[in-house]
Amino acid sequence: MHIKENIEKLRYDIDEVCNEIGTNPDTIKIIAVTKNVNIENIREAITCGMSNLGENRVQEFLNKFPIICDNNVKWHLIGHLQTNKVKHVVGSVCLIQSVDSIKLTQEIDKKARELNIIQDILVEVKTSFEETKFGISIDSLNKVLDEISGLSNIKVKGLMTIAPKVDNEDEARPYFKIAYDLFDRLKSVNQSNIKMEYLSMGMSGDYKAAIKEGSNMIRIGTAIFGERKNKELHCE
Ligand SMILES: *Cc1c(COP(=O)(O)O)cnc(C)c1O
């Protein structure tokens, strides 16, 4: 594996897209997705400046969290979260990106209140009609945000979305645009615990398209760590 070279190439490519669209590359946050990646390789990525790590499964996060104990490293939960596992991640991850139901927001709020903290979250929105995808439908988004306004121990920092798999990443742009338009519209929402700051969209195969549509947080696994084994198992 050539993690250092991969990260250099990734940064170069991000710079190039940003130049093209007139965006400052420093405004794009990279989340290094470490699912199926061993500790040694994660450490190498950290050495190369990756300070935000993303896991999509709670158990894998719990295995790694105590080992990677570096105060400069922040963890993100990016995969579907079951309500019975909320207690394991609240307070340990800086951002739960995959919040996709009212029930989940309530559970996170409850646990955060017990810990006397405020947990930052992103609301995952479904921008395509694929049945298998998690995420809140566009139609229910306002209702969910209304519910959240009554929860004082969570703070919504933005939206997350996963585009459907397409052959050419430009085909994903309409889905990213939908998410951007929602994000942009919600910036004017006047609720103390909702502040649209992050739009998390774009993975190894489509981050360029996502940046072109206004993403400021990309979640990158393969382009940093190489192809995963068991890819189909862990990529819902
Ligand atoms: C695995 C995963 C990623 C990263 O995928 P790559 O294609 O390897 O970059 C991003 N987001 C989520 C939610 C994931 O599960």
Image (cartoon, helix red, strand yellow):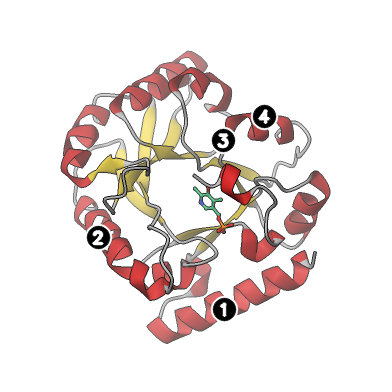
Q: CA distance from mark 3 to mark 1?
A: 28 Å
Q: CA distance from mark 4 to mark 3?
A: 10 Å
**Vertical side of 82 occupied by 2: above or below:** below
Amino acid type of the residue that numbered disc 4 sits on in the rendered structure: Leu
Q: Residues within 10 Å of mark 2 (few under 14, many from 20)?
A: some
* Mark 3, secondary structure of its residue: loop
Question: Residue 138 in the image: x percent, y percent?
Answer: 21, 46
Q: Mark 1 or 4 closer to N-term?
A: 1
* Mark 4, secondary structure of its residue: helix
Count the marks.
4
Left or right: residue 161 compared with residue 127: right
Residue 17 visible in the displayed image: yes
On-image quarter of the N terminus: bottom right
Q: Residues within 10 Å of mark 4 (few under 14, many from 20)?
A: some
Q: Mark 4 or 2 closer to N-term?
A: 4
Q: Which residue is mark 4?
A: 62
Closer mark to the observer between disc 3 and disc 2: 2
Q: Which residue is mark 2?
A: 178
Q: CA distance from mark 2 to mark 1?
A: 24 Å
Q: CA distance from mark 4 to mark 2?
A: 34 Å
Amino acid type of the residue that numbered disc 3 sits on in the rendered structure: Val
Q: Which residue is mark 1?
A: 13
Q: Mark 3 or 1 closer to N-term?
A: 1
CB-based contact (under 8 Å), mark 3 and mark 1: no
Q: Mark 2 or 1 closer to N-term?
A: 1
Q: Residues within 10 Å of mark 1 (few under 14, many from 20)?
A: some
Residue 225 or residue 45, whichever sits in front: 225
